Amino acid sequence: MKDYPLAGKSGTAELKRSADEKGQENGLFVAYSPESPKLLMAMMIEGVEDKGGSKVVVEKVKKVFEKHHKDRF
């Protein structure tokens, strides 16, 4: 976000019984603003394997921060 920088870490957890099978993927993202660390958000979305992985979660968290930033200023 241009005027509201975020620091974060994304990840994808694969749920399967063995390495050679395709399993469910859960996307994760944790983020906060280094300039205003009062809001920290962690989100997980199940079943992101066909939706872009953790990118789906990053976009949703970004929208929350954009709304929070807009409502405050």
Image (spheres, helix red, strand yellow):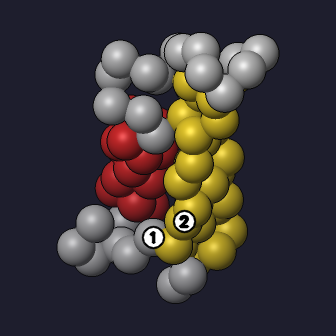
- Report which quarter residue 70 is drawn in: bottom left
> In the image, residue 39 lies at what x, y percent?
64, 61
55 left or right of 9? left
Q: Would you name the residue on which mark 1 appears?
A: 6
63 left or right of 1? right
User: Extreme bottom residue here?
Assistant: 35
Q: What residue type is labelled 2?
A: Gly
User: Given this view, does label 2 or label 1 mark the residue nearer the observer?
Assistant: 2
Q: Which amino acid does label 1 sit on?
A: Leu
> In the image, residue 30 lies at what x, y percent?
62, 54
Asked whether residue 72 is in view, the answer is yes
Pick whichever, 62 or 26, lies toward us: 26
> In the image, residue 56 lies at what x, y percent?
38, 33
Asked whether residue 64 is in view, the answer is no
**Between marks 2 and 1, how big is the CA–CA gap?**
6 Å
Q: In which quarter of the image is the N terminus?
A: bottom left
Identify which residue is drawn at 42% across, 46% down. 58
User: Extreme left residue here?
Assistant: 2
Q: What element carries label 1?
A: loop
Q: Would you name the residue on which mark 2 appears?
A: 8
- Mark 2, residues whose alpha carbon is within 10 Å: few (<14), some, or many (≥20)? some
Above or below: residue 12 compared with residue 35: above
Does the CB distance between marks 2 and 1 fall below 8 Å? yes
- Mark 1, residues whose alpha carbon is within 10 Å: few (<14), some, or many (≥20)? some
Above or below: residue 33 compared with residue 42: below
Q: Quadrant of the C terminus?
A: bottom left
Identify which residue is drawn at 37% across, 41% down. 55
Q: What element carries label 2?
A: strand
> In the image, residue 31 lies at what x, y percent?
57, 60
